[in-house]
Image (cartoon, helix red, strand yellow):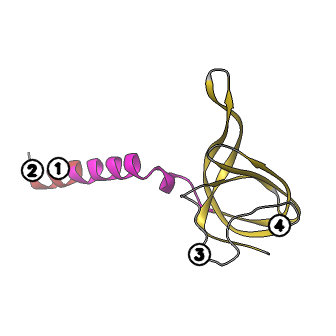
Amino acid sequence: MSCKKIMNVIAVCAIFFMFMFYPSILFAQVPFGGTIVSAFYCVNGIWIIIGGTGIPGSYMYIYGASVSPFLSGPPTHTGQNILGFASVPAPCLVPCFVGLCPIAFGLTILPVHGTSL
């Protein structure tokens, strides 16, 4: 096997393993922002619905993964304004008779985001 073919195989394997271990790079980071219309607390985070002006949608604030570098911290109540980037879809899990059941899905809020007080 020639050196060029070996390098191509190594490159394909490296890209495959990169996407396997870092799946968030498969999804584009989309900007979002607006006023929080609804905030529902799940076992794994906070499911928020953003409406009004800005970019509305359904988003998940995952505990530990969506750490805010700002003093205002995570979204806590309706009426707050939030701005940032979102990526991979995540479920909102709640306890049910079989364990944990997903009730909704939202795009995961990435670490760089900010909320109003």
Dot 2: element: loop
Task: Indicate yes or no whether the magenta region holds residue 12.
Answer: yes
Most foreground residue, 88 or 101: 101
| Secondary structure category for the residue under label 4 | strand
Q: Which quarter of the rendered picture does the N terminus lie within?
A: top left
- Of badges 3 and 1, nearer the viewer stands 3
Dot 1, how many residues are within 10 Å of its Cα: few (below 14), some (14-19), or many (20+)? few
**Chain part drawn in magenta:** 10-29
Q: Which residue is mark 4?
A: 34
Mark 2 surroundings: few (<14), some (14-19) or many (≥20) residues within 10 A: few
Disc 2, disc 1: CB below 8 Å? yes
First along the sequence among labels 3 and 2: 2
- Find the distance from the CA under tag 2 to the CA under tag 4: 55 Å
Instruction: Please report contact status of discs 3 and 4: CB closer than 8 Å, yes or no.
Output: no
Residue type, mark 4 in image? Gly
Quarter-wise, where is residue 34 in the image?
bottom right
| Residue beneath the point at 28% across and 52% down | 14
Q: In this picture, is 28 found above or below 98?
A: below
Q: Which residue in the rendered view is the most extreme toward the top? A: 98
Measure the alpha-carbon separation of dots 3 and 4: 19 Å
Q: Which mark is residue 25?
A: none
Discs 2, 4 touching: Cβ within 8 Å: no
| Whole-number angstrom distance, CA of label 2 to CA of label 1 | 5 Å
Q: Residue at x 64, y 77 (%)?
A: 70
Q: Identify residue for label 1.
A: 5
Name which residue type carries label 3. Pro
x, y percentage for residue 35? 86, 65
Q: Nearer the viewer, mark 3 or mark 4?
A: 3
Q: Secondary structure at mark 1?
A: helix
> How many residues crowd around disc 4 within 10 Å: few (fewer than 14), some, or many (20 or more)?
many
Which residue type carries mark 1? Lys
